[in-house]
Image: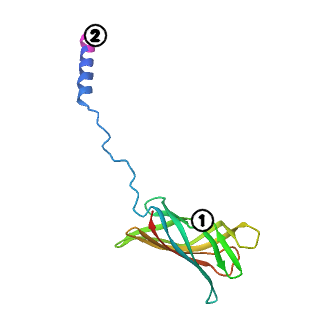
């Protein structure tokens, strides 16, 4: 009887084992990045306005980076500003990242928006011979992506500066 039960268990194991087939992983687990994610080369106009008067304005060539956090948020690294003539001073601002910018899809492409951001340290050289120093900063960011072109407007202030700097960037995907 023991031999018969052993044969039954082996036969059952054989039938069960041969009826289950191993399959390849048919799921496509590769993450597809949205088309707006990437690096953009372009021109940026930086200006400062105080009491309705334009204090300075200049153009900078740079690279903006858009990195996906999840389906609805991105981080935007804005270009470095070098040798911006601001009246009595020449400013330089290192590239910095604005986190958790909302992204939405619309009929024409994508929209980026962050009504208000605050950063603890934006590195800036105010042209006073003291080199780069870190400043608190706040501002907003809004923009669009359509057909490989990104347009982004953002403002930021440096410390106790009485007016924000406005930057308008237009770039194409690298």
Q: Mark 1 or mark 2, which is nearer to you?
A: 1
The residue drawn where x is 30% and y is 43% is 26
Residue at position x 54%, y 68% from top? 62
Q: Nearer the viewer, residue 134 or 126?
A: 126
Any part of residue 48 in sight: no
Q: Residue at x 44, y 72 (%)?
A: 144
Side (left or right) of 41 relative to 7: right
**Label 2's element?**
helix
Magenta residues, as a range? Answer: 1-6
Residue 112 lies within the magenta run:
no
The quarter in which the N terminus is drawn is top left
Q: By what rule are the colours in the image chosen? A: rainbow
Q: Are marks 1 and 2 in contact (CB under 8 Å)?
A: no
Percent of width and height locating residue 33: 41, 57
List x then y, in percent, for residue 131.
Answer: 73, 67
Label located before the other in sequence (1 or 2): 2
User: Does the magenta run of residues contain 2?
Assistant: yes
Residue 125 in which image quadrant: bottom right
Q: Which mark is residue 2?
A: 2
Q: Relative to 13, is 53 above or below?
A: below
Q: Is residue 110 left or right of residue 98?
A: left
* Residue behind mark 1: 95
Q: Residue furthest bottom?
A: 52
**Crowd band around label 1 with a 10 angstrom C-alpha radius: few (<14), some (14–19), many (20+):** some
Q: Percent x, y for residue 21?
A: 26, 32
Total marks placed:
2
């Amino acid at each position: 009887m023991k031999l018969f039960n052993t044969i039954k268990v082996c036969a059952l194991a054989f039938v069960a084992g041969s009826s289950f087939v191993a399959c390849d992983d048919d799921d496509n687990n590769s993450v597809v990045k949205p088309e707006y994610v990437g690096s953009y080369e372009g021109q940026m106009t930086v200006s400062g306005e105080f009491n309705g008067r334009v204090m300075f304005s200049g153009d900078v060539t740079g690279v903006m980076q858009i990195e996906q956090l999840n389906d609805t948020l991105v981080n935007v690294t804005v270009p470095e500003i070098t040798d911006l003539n601001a009246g009595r001073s020449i400013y330089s601002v290192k590239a910095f990242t604005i986190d958790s910018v909302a992204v939405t899809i619309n009929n024409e492409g994508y929209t980026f928006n962050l009504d208000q951001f605050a950063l603890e340290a934006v590195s800036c050289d105010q042209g006073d011979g003291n080199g780069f120093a870190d400043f608190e900063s706040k501002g907003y960011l809004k923009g669009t992506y359509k057909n490989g072109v990104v347009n982004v407007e953002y403002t930021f202030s440096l410390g106790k500066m009485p007016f924000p700097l406005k930057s308008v960037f237009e770039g194409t995907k690298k």
